[in-house]
Amino acid sequence: MPRRLAPVVTVARERGRSPLALPFAVTTVQPDSMRPGQLHTQLDQTLLLVPGVLVQSRDNPSQDPRVSIRGFGARSAFGVRGIRILRDGMPLTMPDGQTAVDYLDLESVGRIEVIRGSASALYGNASGGVVDLHTEAPPNDPFALRLRGWAGDYQQQRWTAAFGGSDGPIGYVGDINYNDRLGYRDFSRQIATSGYGKMAWTSGGTDYAVQVLGYNMPLGDNPGALTRAQADSAPWMADPFSVLKHARKSVSQVQLGVSGQRPLGQGQLSANIWGGTRDLFNPLTFAIVDVYWHSYGGGVRLDQRARFFGLSHEITGGIDLARESDHRRNFANCNGAETSATCPTAGVERGAESLDENETVSNVGPYVRDQVQLGTRSLLSLGVRADLVKFEVDDNLITPTMPDASGARTLDAVSPMGGFVFRVTPLHSLYANVSSAFETPTTTEFGNKPDGSAGLNPDLKPQYSTTYEIGAKGIALGRMEYDLAAFDTEVRDELIPFEVPGGSGRTFYRNAGRTRREGVELGLHALLGDFELGGSYTVAHYRFRNFVVDSVSYAGHSIPGVPATQLQLAATWQKRGWFATVEGIAASRLFVNDANSAAAAGYSIMNVRVGATSVFGNPWIAPVFGVDNLFDAKYIGSVSVNASNGKYFEPSPARTIYAGMTVAVGR
């Protein structure tokens, strides 16, 4: 799916620069370009073939897919951690560093740019990299419409309506999607509606854009994770305790962003503001979590070209501001429980209240970067960012047995970076960089204290990482794109999830002393007549260097949740509007706990799709037929790291057959 090196990319707060001129690993993805017929429901399908990126789909509508870049984010219990996610420059990642991707609409995405590696000097609170989604360009006609329907195994239904158009200086794009499925596993029903809209226009020499995302999921059951015996004997089953407690999620969310950019002298001035709300009702096995939050923020950036000391400089400076406010309440989950002090009324799900607090996160992050052109072939990039993140908790539930747990913690970091790129030829470049990253615990991670009390965990610290990277990229023989990177990342105080016996599956967090990530990533893409080939291979050697728990040392153990090797391949034949695509995925075993005493076996699967393709144009009909996991492999696609009671394993679906039809008009 990665295409030929795009003429320009805009990640890393670029105004638009060839990837060959960037001193770090970056991949551009165009959904449906190389691998047509995608469902646009999960990031694992969209980001296939990006080296260094692992997306573990849990097949659990109550849990987001686990997205990791170079191992960061691989052990997230909720949402996406350690990675910054944006939509047309608007941050979807909250000030505390967590991203809920359940509401991430992929139907109208035209391009995705992925930075692999530390990016804090550019974007702030992140470790693994950046995923920036760009909306597709508006159709040329005043109005164009694309209707699409999908149906398949496990009573899957997906209906979408995408629309757009252009009228002079105004262009707009939008979509509405409805999903209803039972799921491969028992107790995994999902009903959800999402939508996205964007309007852009030019007035008085300034480009403006308004975008809005909306999501409503009234039902998302949680089948939970299984023991090895359960996963081996009946992988489709749900965790009985999750069913007993009726674990599930319902959520509604909306986010709005406004941006503008204007030429200024030899540069450009850009600004954006955004805000949103999210309402979550989340019965879990250990409690009922009821959270309402709102967030808002903005940023301003100035890019300016200048000459100093006989050299050309492109200087970028700016500041990001954000604030998040949560009202969090926890209650006893009385489903399946006997009458007690915490569950006083039989048959009533919501029991005694155990937590009522307001959580606030504020973030300010100024940054500056200078890109110096050293002759015609070399470029030096230097940057630094300072981050200040303040967490505050106001405890509203104070009793003689529950003292006031109000408090505040302020975390800060200065994150420098430097990179150098050398253009060997116009189509080949070598690069090296040293970059740093800063990652705070999220409000959930701060609030989940092993002793069960309210307030912020005073022992939990942020993690810091430094990455050393070298690489080569270019186009060989006029038709094959390559991207090779090798890196070494040193992490201090890495945030690690764990569970405790009798904790009913609740996840807590602690810091490891030091960890080290060494890896090699290779991405290839080639055009051979009517065939298009792509592949990626990732080697990951991630280890604890210094980590002691209860006098037991895990030094030398593999960091769990990430396979040591991952191979992804795809081939597509396209001719006269018809296509056939084959995808192959293979991964080695991965450990599921810090002790490395249990592991999920490696696996290999194959997916196929055949059908027709088109773009906005004259009225057309495009059918698609697909089979995922063609050979019906039995495998574990995702794991719950350091789970209690041996419930590590989240089985992936068996062979899945589906079909879709698209009808469109306009261009």
Image (spheres, grey):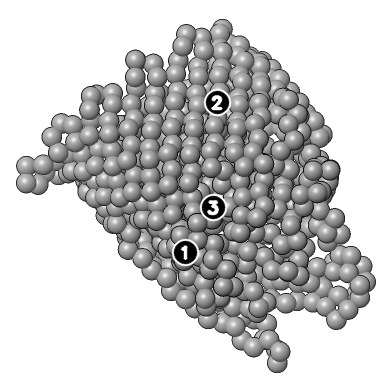
Q: Residue at x 66, y 48 (%)?
A: 599
Q: Which residue is mark 2?
A: 569
Secondary structure, mark 1, is strand
The amino acid type of the residue labelled 2 equals Leu
Does residue 230 show up? yes
The amino acid type of the residue labelled 1 equals Asn
Q: Which residue is mark 1?
A: 546
Q: Measured along the vertical axis of the image, is residue 517 above or below residue 504?
A: above
Q: Residue at x 58, y 11 (%)?
A: 577
Secondary structure, mark 3, is loop
Secondary structure, mark 2, is strand
Question: Disc 3 versus disc 2: distance between alpha carbons?
Answer: 26 Å
- Pick the front one: 370 or 362: 370
Question: Disc 3 versus disc 1: distance between alpha carbons?
Answer: 12 Å
Residue 217 pos. (x, y %): 72, 49
Q: Which residue is mark 3?
A: 558
The amino acid type of the residue labelled 3 equals Ser
**In this picture, residue 527 sits left or right of residue 246:** left
Residue 530 pos. (x, y %): 51, 9
Q: Contact, CB < 8 Å: mark 3 with mark 2?
A: no
Q: Contact, CB < 8 Å: mark 3 with mark 1?
A: no
Q: Measured along the vertical axis of the image, is residue 459 above or below residue 524?
A: below
- Pick the front one: 111 or 323: 111
